[in-house]
Image: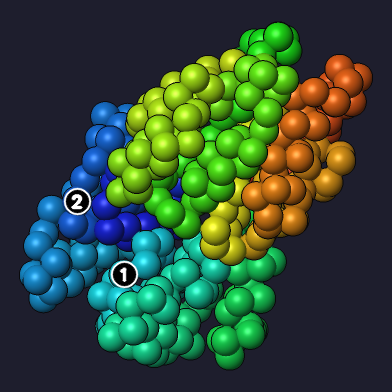
């Protein structure tokens, strides 16, 4: 089987990393087209010899792009096309390919809660995006939802239940589990990894830390914020206003995530939106890190409170109390047990399991 994955760009995001891991793991022949932009992940895939093309077309070149992808499908005798990124024009292409190539299997991959895919804040395009996606989902063979909460968001919105399949995202667990994890020291090391956008909730982490007593708790912790994005400057400004420069470090975009996780004690994620999954959370669990997370979206599918992390009500004060507990009150025995449980639970989300499920669905 030959599978073509369509993505808008090839930067350092979770979807792009998933595709890179699929290319390195799956036994079927995978092809990848990054339609508008390349990026570091696309570059790595090309260097690794993966069947990867960066078209680099303008978003206005709709017909030119359709023809380029169509020619690729014919040249390489593609059996299935999967659209990953939230781009209405790619959804329309999928419908056209379905009509043109009768034996071609088509899949739309939903990597976020439907509300966030449709972007309700963009009132002018919200209804159009919903109509296009709903029609695409009806016409294609399968819709892949990355968690139960994402699947539910589709069903609740009236999407056809019969062709929706849940496939949890996977990652290369060995890359994180094989690092030498540091022992807990005098300072408790927290880490966040992800895009710095408002919806990811790093501002909630800063506000929660600001509520802690500076002498007894804040002096005993350090938080690394790894990633970059449109909200980075606002977060750095807020960090300064709250006087957290002594315990918070903005690390920017980094590629040595396994080593950084191994050097940390806890992963922390307090999102504003209904998080569809959380691949960085799974990576942290594979590295043996318990997590402190808001009970939003799919977080309750990944973290069991008190067992492999702390699942808390979405409230800054509750988050502050959880951080304080992790720093001052959690015993070494409780921490080690939680760490072991996190590592064990992460095995459910291997990239091998992910590609196996995808392969079974398509075949």
The front one of 23 and 2 is: 23
Would you say residue 187 is visible in this rendering? Answer: yes
- Which residue in the protein does label 1 denote? 87
CA gap, disc 2 and disc 1? 13 Å
Residue positioned 14% across, 66% down in the render:
59
- Number of numbered discs overlaid on the protein picture: 2
Which mark, residue 288?
none
Viewed as shown, does residue 12 lie left or right of 167? left
Percent across and percent down for residue 347 are 73, 37
Percent across and percent down for residue 340 are 82, 27
Viewed as shown, does residue 106 lie left or right of 147? left
Q: Quadrant of the N terminus?
A: bottom left
The part of the image, by quadrant, that contains residue 190 is top right
Earlier sequence position, callout 2 versus callout 1:
2
Would you say residue 20 is visible in this rendering? Answer: no
* Label 1 element class: loop
Percent across and percent down for residue 74 are 23, 66
Residue positioned 45% across, 24% down in the render:
245
Q: Are marks 2 and 1 in contact (CB under 8 Å)?
A: no
* Label 2 packing within 10 angstroms: few (<14), some (14-19), many (20+): some
* Label 1 packing within 10 angstroms: few (<14), some (14-19), many (20+): some
- Which residue in the protein does label 2 denote? 37
- Is 95 rendered above or below residue 76? below
Viewed as shown, does residue 136 lie left or right of 166? left
* Label 2 element class: loop
Residue positioned 75% across, 31% down in the render:
324
- Is 142 rendered above or below residue 71? below
Residue positioned 9% across, 62% down in the render:
58
């Amino acid at each position: 089987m030959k599978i073509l994955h369509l993505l808008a760009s090839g930067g350092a995001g979770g979807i792009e990393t998933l595709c890179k891991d699929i290319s390195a793991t799956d036994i079927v022949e995978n092809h990848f087209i990054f339609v508008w932009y390349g990026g570091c992940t696309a570059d790595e895939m090309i260097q690794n010899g993966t069947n990867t093309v960066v078209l680099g077309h303008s978003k206005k070149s709709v017909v030119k792009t359709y023809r380029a992808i169509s020619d690729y499908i014919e040249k390489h005798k593609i059996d299935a096309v999967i659209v990953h990124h939230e781009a209405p024009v790619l959804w329309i292409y999928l419908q056209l390919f379905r009509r043109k190539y009768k034996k071609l299997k088509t899949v739309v991959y939903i990597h976020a809660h439907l509300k966030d895919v449709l972007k309700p804040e963009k009132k002018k395009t919200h209804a159009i995006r919903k109509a296009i996606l709903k029609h695409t989902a009806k016409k294609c063979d399968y819709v892949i939802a990355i968690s139960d909460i994402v699947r539910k968001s589709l069903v609740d919105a009236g999407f056809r239940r019969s062709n929706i399949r849940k496939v949890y995202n996977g990652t290369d667990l060995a890359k994180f589990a094989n690092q030498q994890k540091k022992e807990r020291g005098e300072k408790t090391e927290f880490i966040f990894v992800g895009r710095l956008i408002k919806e990811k909730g790093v501002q909630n982490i800063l506000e929660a830390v600001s509520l802690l007593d500076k002498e007894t708790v804040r002096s005993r912790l350090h938080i690394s914020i790894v990633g970059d994005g449109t909200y980075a400057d606002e977060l750095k400004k807020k960090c300064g206003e709250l006087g957290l420069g002594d315990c918070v470090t903005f690390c920017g975009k980094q590629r040595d995530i396994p080593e950084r996780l191994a050097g940390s004690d806890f992963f922390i994620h307090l999102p504003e939106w209904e998080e569809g999954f959380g691949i960085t959370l799974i990576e942290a669990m594979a590295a043996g890190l318990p997590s402190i997370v808001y009970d939003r979206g799919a977080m309750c599918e990944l973290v069991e409170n008190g067992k492999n992390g702390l699942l808390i009500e979405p409230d800054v004060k509750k988050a502050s109390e959880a951080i304080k507990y992790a720093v001052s009150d959690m015993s070494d025995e409780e921490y080690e047990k939680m760490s072991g449980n996190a590592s064990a639970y992460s095995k459910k989300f291997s990239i091998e399991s992910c590609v196996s499920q995808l392969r079974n669905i398509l075949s």
